[in-house]
Amino acid sequence: MFYTCGPNEAMVVSGFGRSPPLMIAGGRVFVFPCIQQIQRITLNTLTLNVKSDKVYTRHGVPISVTGIAQVKIQGQNKEMLATACQMFMGKSEAEVAQIALETLEGHQRAIIAHLTVEEIYQDRKKFSEQVFKVASSDLVNMGIGVVSYTLKDVHDDQDYLHSLGKARTAQVQRDARIGEAQYKRDAVIREAHAMQEKVSAQYKNEIEMAKAQRDYELKKAAYDVEVNTKKAESEMAYQLQVAKTKQRIEEEKMQVQVVERAQQITLQEQEIIRKEKELEAKVKKPAEAEKYRLEKLAEAQRLQLIMEAEAEAESVRMKGEAEAFALEAKGRAEAEQMAKKAEAFKQYKDGAMVDMLLEKLPLMAEEISKPLSAAQKVTMVSSGGSEVGAAKLAGEVLDIMTRLPTAVEKLTGVNISQAAGSTTRVR
């Protein structure tokens, strides 16, 4: 079976399966009938009127004190709720309130006994804090928390507090009369001082006015002198400034002329530079270009000549190698021919020699007659007849030709006529 309770109440379920008992503050719980038991405890705030009548203070004065306290069982703290359940389960709300009231009253009486009437009456806040602190530490052990404590009333039957009030009232009244008399005295004194200060201030004011008038006249005279001096200085400064201005104007004109002259010089220099650049562009650059072209042409020709010379040298080298090869081949052929002729000479001896001489005679005759054949014109100079000289020259040539075989025979030792028969064989 389900049971519910509000936030101002707590339920305690005990019995089968509930060890320790289950405590729920504001909620619901399922309870098995017959084997489980549910109990309730109030969590309402309890207002307690704590009265302590005729309690003797530290000085033995009996007073009565009334305080108002608000207490309740703390349901949110499980330990305090468990303690409260152990102490107050089954008790009514009035019974719980009575227990808490008696506890608070005891602590209140104990604190009153340690204080004087003046301390309790004049410093109620301190008294309330002490009661709240002491009672809270004791009630917590019961599971009850003190929400607040306020001192409501303090009175006595011996008119002690009334007497304290009368004395204080008389003191206040005395202080008031004294204060009033002092105020009146001070007012008269202040009034006299004010009148004196007024007269003194008036005299001082007149003196200050006279001094101010005197200072005014002196300063005015000094100011007049200074103003006149300043006027004269101003006029002189004006004239000087006019002269300086004129001089500055002249200097500015000279500066303008200098600037104009400098600009003209700059323009002339720029014109010179322009003409130099124009001359350079029209004369120097083309000349340099022509020089560069001629240098390149000369370089190309030089390279061409070098290449032609190298080609010619290569051609000569190859031609020389070819001629050398041809001469070598010709030499080898002639050597073979000479070797064959040498063998023939060994076989035919004189006939071979004659045959060789006969072969060389036309060549010898050609070499002898070559100077004559190279001559385009022969002029005979003599003192006698020219016909006789020509005939004589022809006779000498024939004589040389007829004596040539004889000379050959003498040189070689071979008889040409004898060797004529073997000539055919040698050939």
Image (cartoon, rainbow, N blue to C red):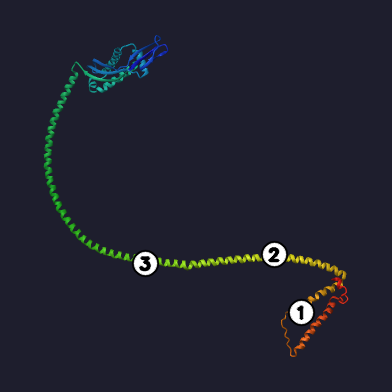
- Marks 2 and 1, how far apart at CA: 38 Å
Residue at 56% x, 66% y is 297
Q: Quadrant of the N terminus?
A: top left
* Labelled pair 3, 1 in contact (Cβ < 8 Å): no
258 horizontally vs 311: left or right: left
Q: Position of residue 36 (x, y in %)?
A: 39, 11
Of label 3 and label 2, which has the lower sequence position? 3
Work out whether 339 lies above or below 379: above
Of label 2 and label 1, which has the lower sequence position? 2
Q: What residue would you read off at disc 1?
A: 369
Q: Nearer the viewer, residue 148 or 37?
A: 37
173 horizontally vs 410: left or right: left
Q: Secondary structure at mark 3?
A: helix
Q: Nearer the viewer, residue 193 or 393?
A: 393
How crowded is the residue under tag 3: few (<14 C-alpha within 10 Å), some, or many (20+)?
few
Which amino acid type is shown beneath numbered disc 3?
A: Gln
Which amino acid type is shown beneath numbered disc 1?
A: Ser
How crowded is the residue under tag 2: few (<14 C-alpha within 10 Å), some, or many (20+)?
few
Residue 246: quadrant of the picture: bottom left
Q: Position of residue 86 (x, y in %)?
A: 36, 13
Work out whether 133 lies above or below 355: above
Residue 417, numbered circle: none
Residue 365: quadrant of the picture: bottom right
Residue 264, numbered circle: 3
Residue at 79% x, 66% y is 333
Residue 143 is at least partly visible in this image: no
Q: Nearer the viewer, residue 322 or 17?
A: 322
* Labelled pair 2, 1 in contact (Cβ < 8 Å): no
